[in-house]
């Protein structure tokens, strides 16, 4: 059996451990709520203005803090107790969801308010993300980290199936305000999943000592590692230009396919593909870089094909490979970052992974929205696919 072969216990082997089962269960319910909020935010902003560019700006406000705080937050997560950090961030995230829900229900919502709360969400999320990812390294032995990271992606992206579908069903009778409230309540599941972890079964965390130059150290390490530097290049290019379909989907569904309520269902079908893609990655004991590159190609082809889909049915079908390629790429990157990381650098490297992926969104989101509003609705999605193909060409040249 090669080092990339499937483990003997299959793709769910990390769930042999109680702490992993509890944590992922809490994460699933909490992220269903998060996808309720994400979908509701898109409905709300499009209802307020009807412009894809405003959706792009909303995405930019939410993920801008990750660009500036993400790597520092990873260093913070490497030094302090990740469970404590996460409990604080979950409470703050719940408060943000409740606030926007109440403001929406009382008709006191406006675009600047949405942007302000999105910025707050981004600041808290920048602290939460590396602590949450780093905590996974304490739930399973080192040999199972790649599998655990892939299952984490499965839960994160798979929850879109339920969250986006619930949003599509509930937004009509309840309105967007109650979807935010439901998300606020869902954080209780994540808090329970953290508090209930058995300390006796935790894998001891390797804490980074105080002092030194933690951010500079992680950048130097990535530059010196060919697999990591290639993975990060793909992450930055793809997330900047090819991962902003949620910005343009509401307008595509409304203007091109004549079904404005289809947005939530497009995300749901994408989520189904995401589950399959993440689980396919979880089968690898060691994730090869060529698997990541293959899925960059799948994502690119799906972006171009959906952009020129003649009707909603074809778009639904093409959303499956869109989700597959995206989730498999994310899971591959997370797994590779952990496989190549020294124990005391895992939090920082995971944070840098999040910065590369989410921190690029504030650039790509507005670009995608502006292209949709003022250049071409189809090319606002298709240009992301072209970017994927150019990324593959550069990587192929580098590894020639």
Image: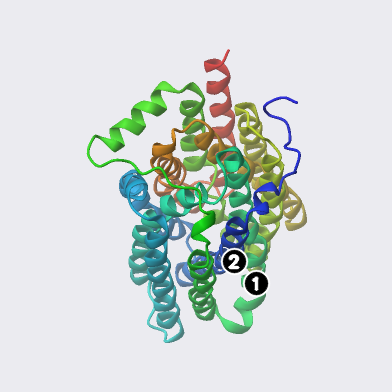
Q: How many marks?
A: 2
Instruction: Name the residue at the top extreme.
Output: 400
Residue lying at 65% horizontally and 36% vertically, measured from the top left: 295
In front here: 226 or 121? Answer: 226
Identify the residue under disc 2: 32
Residue mark closest to the camera, 1 vs 2: 2
Instruction: Pick whichever, 67 or 31, lies toward us.
Output: 31
User: In the shown orientation, is residue 96 left or right of residue 187?
Assistant: left
Q: Secondary structure at mark 1?
A: helix
Q: Position of residue 68 (x, y in %)?
A: 31, 47
Decide which of 104, 249 is in the foreground and name it: 104
Q: Earlier in the sequence, mark 1 or mark 2?
A: 2
**Residues at circles 1 and 2 in contact by the CB criterion of under 8 Å:** yes
- How crowded is the residue under tag 1: few (<14 C-alpha within 10 Å), some, or many (20+)? many
Residue at 60% across, 38% down: 143
Give residue 395's position: percent from left, percent from top: 54, 22
Q: Quadrant of residue 326?
A: top right
Examine the rendered structure and indicate whether residue 340 appears above or below residue 366. above
Q: Quadrant of residue 111?
A: bottom left
State the image coordinates of residue 270 (x, y, percent, origin top left). 67, 54
- Specify the label residue 221 is tagged with: none
Q: Nearer the viewer, residue 394 or 145?
A: 145
Pointer 1: what residue?
Answer: 166
- Furthest residue toward left: 211
Picture residue at 37% right of the left edge, 82% below the top: 108
For the N terminus, the quadrant is top right
> Which quarter of the rendering shows the C terminus?
top right
* Secondary structure of residue under mark 2: helix
| Spatial CA span between label 1 and label 2 | 9 Å
Q: Is residue 308 visible?
A: no
**Counting other residues with Cα less than 10 Å from the Cα at mark 2, is it few (<14), some (14-19), or many (20 or more)?**
many
């Amino acid at each position: 059996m090669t080092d990339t072969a499937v483990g003997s216990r299959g793709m769910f082997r990390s769930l042999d451990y109680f702490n992993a089962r509890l944590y992922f269960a809490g994460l699933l319910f909490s992220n269903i709520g998060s996808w309720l909020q994400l979908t509701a935010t898109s409905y709300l902003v499009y209802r307020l203005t009807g412009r894809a560019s405003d959706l792009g700006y909303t995405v930019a406000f939410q993920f801008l803090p990750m660009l500036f705080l993400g790597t520092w937050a990873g260093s913070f997560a490497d030094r302090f107790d990740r469970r404590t950090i996460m409990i604080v961030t979950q409470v703050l995230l719940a408060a943000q969801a409740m606030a926007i829900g109440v403001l929406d229900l009382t008709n006191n919502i406006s675009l600047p308010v949405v942007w302000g709360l999105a910025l707050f969400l981004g600041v808290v999320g920048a602290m939460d993300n590396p602590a949450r990812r780093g905590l996974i390294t304490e739930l399973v032995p080192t040999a199972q980290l790649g599998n655990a990271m892939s299952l984490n992606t499965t839960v994160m992206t798979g929850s879109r199936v339920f969250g986006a579908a619930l949003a599509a069903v509930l937004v009509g009778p309840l309105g967007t305000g109650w979807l935010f409230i439901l998300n606020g309540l869902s954080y209780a599941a994540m808090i329970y999943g953290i508090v209930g972890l058995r300390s006796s079964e935790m894998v001891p965390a390797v804490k980074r000592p105080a002092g030194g130059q933690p951010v500079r150290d992680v950048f130097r390490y990535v530059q010196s590692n060919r697999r990591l530097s290639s993975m990060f290049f793909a992450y930055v290019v793809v997330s900047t230009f090819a991962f902003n379909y949620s910005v343009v989907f509401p307008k595509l569904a409304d203007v091109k396919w004549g079904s404005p309520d289809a947005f939530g269902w497009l995300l749901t079908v994408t989520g189904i593909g995401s589950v399959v893609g993440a689980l396919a990655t979880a089968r690898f004991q060691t994730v090869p870089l060529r698997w990541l590159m293959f899925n960059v190609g799948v994502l690119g082809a799906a972006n171009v094909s959906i952009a020129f889909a003649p009707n909603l049915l074809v778009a639904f079908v093409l959303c499956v490979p869109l989700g597959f390629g995206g989730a498999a790429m994310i899971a591959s990157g997370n797994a590779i970052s952990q496989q190549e990381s020294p124990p005391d650098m895992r939090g920082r490297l995971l944070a840098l992974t999040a910065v590369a992926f989410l921190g690029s969104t504030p650039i790509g989101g507005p670009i995608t929205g502006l292209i949709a509003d003022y250049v071409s609705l189809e090319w606002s999605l298709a240009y992301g696919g072209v970017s994927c193909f150019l990324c593959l060409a550069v990587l192929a040249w580098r590894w020639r």
